[in-house]
Structures are given as structure tokens and as C-alpha cells.
Amino acid sequence: MKKNRYLLCLLLSGFMLYFAVPRLTVNLDGAQGIFSAVWLIFALIVMAGNLTGLLYSPKKQGQKFETGRLKKKSRSFH
């Protein structure tokens, strides 16, 4: 479930960057240039965080765990 959220946030931030980059000018002096640079840095940090969460999220344990407890093997003595 978290992977879907990470992917959605990554796509939305990429969509925002797609529209914002042509309109932002970092070369300007003053507040406009600083705002553009800071906005781009924050957008890249958001994308990096979501990509990290997507790539390094823990894998599902599958059949080894049964409702949070270790599944014990049953022994039979014949």
C-alpha cells in the first residue's frame, strides 16, 4: 500500500516539475532567483525521498509470518 503512495507522490512531483521548470528562471537576481532555486531544490528533495522510499521499502515476508508471529514447524515423532 505504501508503494502506491510513494509512486503517486513521485509522479505528481514529476508532473509539477514538468510544468514549473520552463517558467522558473534561476539566473535572475534578487528574490525571484532565490525563490526559483529553493523551489527546485525542495522539489528534487521530495522526488529523492519518494524514490528512496519506493526502492528501499521492506519486502513482504510472505509465508514465514502468520499474523505477526513466526510460523513454527510441527514435529511428529513416529
Image (tube, rainbow, N blue to C red):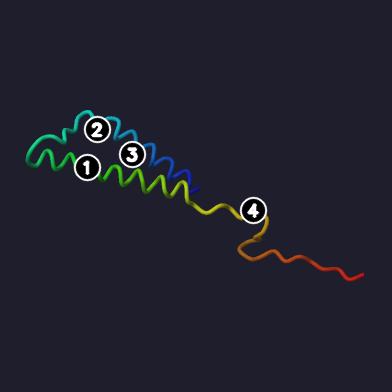
Q: Amino acid at mark 2?
A: Ala
Element marked by disc 2: helix
Check the image and name the residue furthest to the bottom.
Answer: 77
CB-based contact (under 8 Å), mark 1 and mark 2: yes
Between discs 3 and 2, the one toward the N terminus: 3
Q: Position of residue 44 (x, y in %)?
A: 30, 43
CB-based contact (under 8 Å), mark 1 and mark 4: no
Q: Is 73 placed above or below 43 here?
A: below
Work out how far the residue at label 3 is from the one at label 1, CA to CA, in angstroms.
Answer: 12 Å
The residue sitting at 43% across, 50% down in the picture is 53
Q: Position of residue 42 (x, y in %)?
A: 26, 46
Q: Position of residue 69 (x, y in %)?
A: 64, 66
Q: Position of residue 7 (x, y in %)?
A: 44, 41
Q: Residues within 10 Å of mark 3 (few under 14, many from 20)?
A: some
Q: Amino acid at mark 3?
A: Ser
Q: Amino acid at mark 4?
A: Gly
Element marked by disc 1: helix
Element marked by disc 3: helix
Q: Quadrant of residue 29?
A: top left
The residue sitting at 34% across, 36% down in the picture is 14
Q: Badge 3 is on which residue?
A: 13
Between discs 1 and 4, the one toward the N terminus: 1
Residue 20, disc = 2
Residue 39, disc = 1
Work out how far the residue at label 3 is from the one at label 4, CA to CA, in angstroms.
Answer: 32 Å
Q: Residues within 10 Å of mark 4 (few under 14, many from 20)?
A: few
Count the marks: 4
Work out how far the residue at label 4 is from the one at label 2, CA to CA, in angstroms.
Answer: 42 Å
Work out how far the residue at label 3 is from the one at label 2, CA to CA, in angstroms.
Answer: 10 Å
Between discs 1 and 2, the one toward the N terminus: 2
CB-based contact (under 8 Å), mark 4 and mark 2: no
